[in-house]
Amino acid sequence: MKETDPRFARLTGKVGLFFIIAAAGIIATVVSIGIERGIFTAKYRINFTVDKGTGFFEGMPVKLSGFKIGKIDSMSLDEHAKVKITLLINKKYSKWIRQDSKATLTKEGFIGEGVIDITVGSTNKPLIGDGGVIQNEKARGLDEIAEEMRPVIGEIRDIISYVNDPKGDIKQTLTNLKTLSSGLNATKENTDKLLKNADTNISGVSSNVSKTLKNVDSLVSNVDKTVSSMNDKINPVIDKLNRTMDNAEKTTANLKDAVGKSAPKLPPLLNKGEDALSDTSEVVKSLKQIWPIRLFIEKPKDSLTHGDSYE
Amino acid sequence: MNKSKQYIVDNIQGKIKNKFFIFCLLLAVYCLLLIGCGGAQTQTLSAVNLRAIEYNQNAAKAMEKGDYEKALAYYMEALRVNRSIENTEGIAVNLINMAVLYQKKGKTSLLGESPKATNAHEFIDIAFSMPDISNEIKSDAAYEKARIYLKEKNTAKAKEWVDKSLSLNKGLNEGSRWNLVGRIALAEGKHEEALTTANTALKLNMENKQRAEESNSLRLMAEINAQKGLYSESRELYKKSLEIDKELGDSKKIAMTLRGIGMLSLKQGHFQDAVIFYMRAYDVSSNVGDTEEASEALNSMSDAYRKSGNEKKAEEMMKKKADMEKEKKK
């Protein structure tokens, strides 16, 4: 039977074409995902050994300078019950991974995913080839972070003992200032008395004035001496504070480094969080200032952790 | 006609009443707004200050979850920010918190005896000598110092510092200070003094609704009674303490109390009971990941098996303990 309806003419061809286009679309999608995921990229394997496999998992990203260059391909126990970790790395990044490169297990921020961070090797060192071994560096732990506290504690202690020292420059300067202010009070009292007597005894006034002026002169000279002595004493104080500030900056840099190494993405994470929350916090901040809401809001303060009496 | 007049009058009166009511309402709102706007403004904190507080609170949350690494990093940030604005109270609070954190790790120094090691004593010494800090903070610093000394078994020094803490400030935490006084007395073998002090602490903690410290007072009393040979009184006190520990969901304390009851059963010669209590303590500790407490429970379990004559099981427990410690060292 011949198809007479013009709408169904060449139907087989049309359906075939539809399937071909659909199949081509699917293949293109698969290929593009494959390219995106690096399935068709040439890869090679390198490995390292650790005592414990805690924190590692198959598929864990491997990064170099924060850029993903591969993943953990497999994990297995060797004959010494140590964990052998094999990394699958994109071949095109092999030029950066050399004999002095190190692989470290780290975290993307405190709450982030674990990653293996590989350091860029020196150009004069040979490349690590397929099946080669890369050095493993233990990530910084609590002990290492705590170690950074030593200089901080030393500095705070110095400042506090310096401020609290009764024979120190600061306390001495404060004592001098007290003496100076009591001298000024006596002068003020003298002047007040003088003005009271002004109407009754002009001659007395002139003699009193000359006496008082003498007092003022001696006081001014004392002030000059005290100020110059204060300058002498304050200059070393400022020098010391400047030195301390320099040290504090260095220490802060060390601390940043310590925290950065244990959680390299903490500052960006916090910044990102701050950006995202800034609008909301502005609104909340304004609301908190509105009466009567503000009456019910407790002023935030540093929370003191109370130690347990049975611990 | 009269009826319609009456209706009109009623209607007008009703409208006047309504308007008067609305007027009064508006007047009240106006007055309230006037009071509100004229009222004292709350003191606002600078952005830097708030940042320091945020770090401090993040650290406290991390410490609560047992993530000490994260807590220490946050406390260090809070300390840095507070130093940048010379906030002495903030510096002192964060130093005290770090001393608490060190002790939670079961150590007074995180780096052992290394000359590089900072230790809890140093944090407290500095916090205590900070100028311009409140007596409340000073009292807490002194209390922490006493806790550290007690851990180091220096009861004389611990007593000196806890007394200092009590003389500086009492407040809601007074009960915890008396608990510590009681523990010091117990460590010195002064049972009667310890019991009197624990009773004072219990009363204060109940009044101040300090449930965790209330449980501590009960546990302390149970321990004293156990040492005095008053086993049934001791068991009752342990049970009350356990109830509070469970209510608070404090695994460490639950395990500690269970081990206490186990020890009591052991003293009474109820070896099978003792094994069960120790087993429960081990289960709690191992599930919360507290290897130190779990290891202690295994040790006690081995002791109970040995006393019951089951040498094989006792050895098994010791082996398990050794394996656990080996795994921890890795």
Image (cartoon, grey):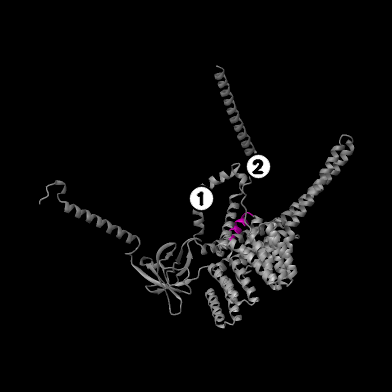
The residue that label 2 is drawn on is B40
Judge from the rendering whether residue A266 lies leftward or rightward of residue A172; answer left or right: left
Judge from the rendering whether residue A200 lies leftward or rightward of residue B104; answer left or right: right
Q: Quadrant of the C terminus of chain A?
A: bottom right
Q: Name which residue lies at 38% across and 74% down.
A: A131
Identity of the residue furthest to the top in this view: B1
User: Which labelled disc corresponds to residue B232?
Assistant: none
Residue A193: tell me if it is visible. yes
Q: What chain does badge 1 belong to?
A: A
Q: Is residue B66 above or below residue A13?
A: below
Q: CA distance from mark 2 to mark 1?
A: 28 Å
Amino acid type indicated by mark 1: Leu
Q: Name which residue lies at 53% across and 48% down.
A: A281
Q: Is residue B1 above or below residue A79?
A: above
Q: Name which residue lies at 55% across and 46% down.
A: A284
Judge from the rendering whether residue B192 lies leftward or rightward of residue A279; answer left or right: right
Is B247 in front, or is A112? B247
Residue B260 in picture, x, y percent from top left: 63, 71
Magenta range is B75-85
Q: Residues within 10 Å of mark 2 (few under 14, many from 20)?
A: few
Magenta stretch containing residue B126, yes or no? no
Q: Residues within 10 Å of mark 1 (few under 14, many from 20)?
A: few
Total tally of numbered discs in the picture: 2
Identity of the residue furthest to the left in this view: A1
Judge from the rendering whether residue B246 lies leftward or rightward of residue A159; answer left or right: left
The residue that label 1 is drawn on is A277
Determine the image quadrant of residue B202: bottom right
Residue B129: tell me if it is visible. no
Is A142 in front, or is B180? B180
Residue A244 in picture, x, y percent from top left: 64, 60
Q: What chain does badge 2 belong to?
A: B
Residue A192 in picture, x, y percent from top left: 83, 40
